[in-house]
Image: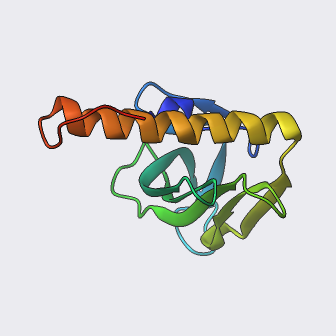
Amino acid sequence: MKKKILLFVVLALSLTARGDVLLTNPVPQPTVLGGAGTVDYDTLEILNFTVDPQAGSISTRVRLVASSDPNRPALAGTYAIVTGTGNPHARLVIPTIGFDQSLSLSAGQVAAGQADIADFVTKLSNAAIVFGLTAGTVQ
């Protein structure tokens, strides 16, 4: 389900099999304040998320991690896709590195995002039936 969420170029991104985003160009961060050494933060992990089919939106917490050094602290942020009326957009914010990018969505991106949200909700509803939590059919 993470693979099918509407994606667009924010930082030249590519999707991994787990649903994390492997950055094409890692973000170097200093290893020591005032030092010359850096560590590359190269993976954007998508954490818990909220899907609101009425508003046509997805919001999630994300974290940027340095896969080469798992002891480095993750850099927290947010990612949102809004396909509803008004101002359809996608926004990625990682305050620690001063990254705040918001992009307007085209009509095609809005349609794809709305289809992805509807598909996710249908699959989630179907899972409740398959797992035996509810009886019925998905409408």
- Tell me how the rendering is colored: rainbow
Q: Which residue is depicted at the point 72% across and 70% down?
A: 98
Q: Outermost residue, left direction?
A: 132
- Vertical side of 116 occupied by 39: above or below: below
- Vertical side of 120 occupied by 36: above or below: below
Q: Which residue is depicted at the point 61% across and 67% down?
A: 35
The N terminus: image quadrant: top left
Q: Which residue is depicted at the point 83% across and 54% down?
A: 103
Viewer-proximal residue among 30 and 127? 127
Q: Position of residue 32 (x, y in %)?
A: 53, 69
Viewer-proximal residue among 57 and 39? 57
- Vertical side of 80 occupied by 111: above or below: above
Q: Position of residue 139 (x, y in %)?
A: 43, 35
Q: Is residue 89 left or right of residue 136?
A: right
Q: Position of residue 131 (x, y in %)?
A: 15, 34
Q: Is residue 62 left or right of residue 38?
A: left
Viewer-proximal residue among 86 and 64? 86
Q: Quadrant of residue 24?
A: top right
Residue 24 visible? The answer is: no
Q: Position of residue 132 (x, y in %)?
A: 11, 36
- The total number of labels drawn is 0
Residue 40 visible? The answer is: yes
Viewer-proximal residue among 19 and 120? 120
Q: Is residue 138 left or right of residue 80?
A: left
